[in-house]
Image (spheres, helix red, strand yellow):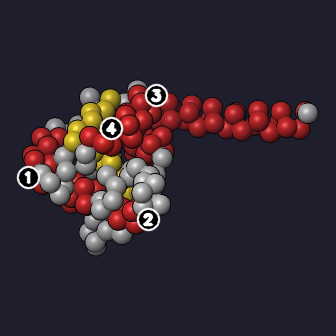
Amino acid sequence: MTIVPIIMGSKSDLKHGQAIADALAEFGIASEIRVASAHKAPRFALEVLAAYEADPQPKVYITVAGRSNALSGLVDGAVTAPVIACPPYSDRYGGADVFSSLRMPSGIAPAVVLEPSGAALLAAKILSLAEPALRERVAQAQQAATETIMTDDRSLRET
C-alpha cells in the first residue's frame, strides 16, 4: 500500500501536518504523521526514515519544519524517494524563514510547496506515475478546479 510519511520537526506543526494528511485523504492516499527533529533527535529521525525505506512500496515524503529547516535536507539526503518540504508560515519571522527551505546544499533537492493542499497534490501527481487509478483521481480534481473557475467567471458575467 502506498503511504506518504509526513515528518514534522515538532508537535507544534501538527495543524499544518494534519491539513496535508486531510488533503492526501481526498485523493485516497494514506499518510502517517511523525515527529522527528533533525536538530534535537537526528539519530531517531534516521531510524524512522530507515524503517520507511525498508518498505519497497512507492512513497513520497512530506516534511513540515520551519525556522531552520534542516529536516527537509536530512530526509532528502537519507532517502531515494521524492521529498516535498511544506514549511508552515511563521508570523514571528514574517515568512523569512522559508529561505531555509529554498536554499539547500548541492545534492539535496526537496521540492518546496508552501500550501498543504499543494503539497498533497504534488505527492499525488508523483505517485500517480505508478498508479493509473490515482492518476484518474488527480485528473478529476483538476477538472473540478477548472469547472469552479468557469462557474465563477460565468456568474460574474451574468450579473
Q: Secondary structure at mark 3?
A: helix
Residues packed near mark 3 inside 10 Å, few (<14), some (14 to 19) or many (20 plus): some
- Mark 1 or mark 2: whose residue is earlier in sequence: 1
Q: Could you tell which of marks 3 and 1 lies nearer the N-terminus?
A: 3
Residue appearing at x 17%, y 41% in the figure = 52
Which residue in the structure is indicated by mark 4?
Answer: 14
Depth check, mark 1 against mark 2: the one in front is 2
Circle nearer the N terminus (2, 3)? 3
In the depicted view, which residue is nearer to us: 144 or 69?
Answer: 69
Q: Which residue is mark 2?
A: 96
Residue at the front extreme of this rendering? 92
Q: Which residue is mark 1?
A: 43
**On-image quarter of the N terminus:** top left
| In the image, farthest residue toward the bottom | 106
Callout 1, which amino acid? Arg
Determine the residue positioned at 18% across, 55% down.
38
The CA span between labels 3 and 1 is: 33 Å
| Amino acid at circle 4 | Leu
Q: Which residue is mark 3?
A: 26
Residues at discs 2 and 3 in contact (Cβ within 8 Å): no
The image quadrant where one finds the C terminus is top right
Say if 115 sits above or below 74 in the image: above
88, above or below 94, in the image: above
How dense is the environment of label 1, judged by Cα within 10 Å: few (below 14), some, or many (20 and up)? few
